[in-house]
Image (tube, rainbow, N blue to C red):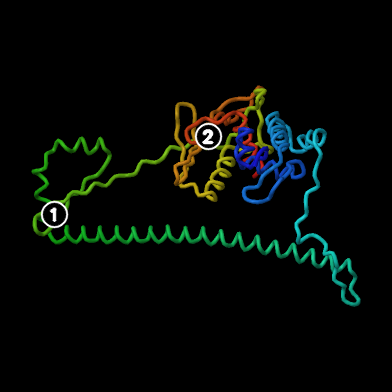
């Protein structure tokens, strides 16, 4: 349809994500005009100008209230349509004897709110059950692995007890020069001889721990810079650990398969990857504000290996901040 826009069209025009366009609609429902409500939803031509102005206001660091005033001065606000279930019937049902019409309206409104609350509770319960099933599945696998390891070590000990003389004497033919290499690799070699005389070697290695920033770095307040090179933080001086906790919670709900830290010089990078290969990498560094306060700066965001624009980074930071 000519001269109309979908969520994807508006996102491409403004250089933001579709999620950002949807957040514009939630924050300013009376300014982005809808043309058709089929799938996909299409918007009138003037929606592009309105979305661009919202994006520019947010890029300047303006709040939702300040942006609303700007839109009110430049565009006509459309009253938000009420859901059908909230509309009063054209022919109201007569109230029973002794009960006022106002009381009946309040009763039905309260009943509707209770139904909505029960629906939300059912959805939350379903999500909790899904998470519980995942935890139970992981625990079952861990118990199975533990049982296998116990059986394996039990068999190895039985073999050593049945042939004590054979397991101790043949150690001399092994070349002694291999010992320094074993120490260099920080692993332990165990030789086990079976009753038939066959020797088997097992390597016991300790897994390498993943990198992680220090507690001092994680407990430092997080900030970002706007286009005027000014530091913008979070009310309450949210530390980096709290910011990452929000990211990890959102990642779990969206199906992200892995999150981890790694370091490049003085920069710590927090990476989130999805099963379909998509990834996000956030770059953090330690710095000080003009007032001498020590902070952690979110200075870069890579999406699927490509560096995002400063406007996208600021909008990303703002969305995470709104979820506190």
Which residue is found at the position 57% from the left and 62% from the top? Answer: 126
Give the CA distance from mark 2 to mark 1.
52 Å
Do we see residue 85 in this rendering?
yes
Do we see residue 316 in this rendering?
no
Q: Secondary structure at mark 1?
A: strand
Task: Specify few, some or many for label 1: CA neighbours under 10 Å numbering under 14, 14-19, or 20 or more.
Answer: many
Which quadrant would residue 71 be assigned to in this image? top right
| In this rendering, position of residue 127 left or right of residue 82 | left
| In this rendering, position of residue 166 left or right of residue 202 | left
Which residue is found at the position 57% from the left and 37% from the top? Answer: 240
Q: Nearer the viewer, residue 97 or 266?
A: 97
Give the number of the disc on residue 312: none
Which quadrant would residue 231 be assigned to in this image? top right
| In this rendering, position of residue 63 left or right of residue 5 | right
Check if mark 2's residue and mark 1's residue have beta carbons within 8 Å. Answer: no
Q: Nearer the viewer, residue 201 or 311?
A: 311
Instruction: Provide the residue designation for mark 2.
Output: 282
Q: Quadrant of the C terminus?
A: top right
Residue 307 in the image, given as x and y percentages of width and height = 52, 30
Give the number of the disc on residue 193: 1
Task: Specify few, some or many for label 2: CA neighbours under 10 Å numbering under 14, 14-19, or 20 or more.
Answer: many
Q: Secondary structure at mark 2?
A: strand
Residue 155 in the image, given as x and y percentages of width and height = 21, 61
Residue 35 lies, with reference to residue 50, above or below; the image says below
Looking at the image, tell me whether mark 2 or mark 1 is earlier in sequence order.
1
| In this rendering, position of residue 274 left or right of residue 316 | left
């Amino acid at each position: 349809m000519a001269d109309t826009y979908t969520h994807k069209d508006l996102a491409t025009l403004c250089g933001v994500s579709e999620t950002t366009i949807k957040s514009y609609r939630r924050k300013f429902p009376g300014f982005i005009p809808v043309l058709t409500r089929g799938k996909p939803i299409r918007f009138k031509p003037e929606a592009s100008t309105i979305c661009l102005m919202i994006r520019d206001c947010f890029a300047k660091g303006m709040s939702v209230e300040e942006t609303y005033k700007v839109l009110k001065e430049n565009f006509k606000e459309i009253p938000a349509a009420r859901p059908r279930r909230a509309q009063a019937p054209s022919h109201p049902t007569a109230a029973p004897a002794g009960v006022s019409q106002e009381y009946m309206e309040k009763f039905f409104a309260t009943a509707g709110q209770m139904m909505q609350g029960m629906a939300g509770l059912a959805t939350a319960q379903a999500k909790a059950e899904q998470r519980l099933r995942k935890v139970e599945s992981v625990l079952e696998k861990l118990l199975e692995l533990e049982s296998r390891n116990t059986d394996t070590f039990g068999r190895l000990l039985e073999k050593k007890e049945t042939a004590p003389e054979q397991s101790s004497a043949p150690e001399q033919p092994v070349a002694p020069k291999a010992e320094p290499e074993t120490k260099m690799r920080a692993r332990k070699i165990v030789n086990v001889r079976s009753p038939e005389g066959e020797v088997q070697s097992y390597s016991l290695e300790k897994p390498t721990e993943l990198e992680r920033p220090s507690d001092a770095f994680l407990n430092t307040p997080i900030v970002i810079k706007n286009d005027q090179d000014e530091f913008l933080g979070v009310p309450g001086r949210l530390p980096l650990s709290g910011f990452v906790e929000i990211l990890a919670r959102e990642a779990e709900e969206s199906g992200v398969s892995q999150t981890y830290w790694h370091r490049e010089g003085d920069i710590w990078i927090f990476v989130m990857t999805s099963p379909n290969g998509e990834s996000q990498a956030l770059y953090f560094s330690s710095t000080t504000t003009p007032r001498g306060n020590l902070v952690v700066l979110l200075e870069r965001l890579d999406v699927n290996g490509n560096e995002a624009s400063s406007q996208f980074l600021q909008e990303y930071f703002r969305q995470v901040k709104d979820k506190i």
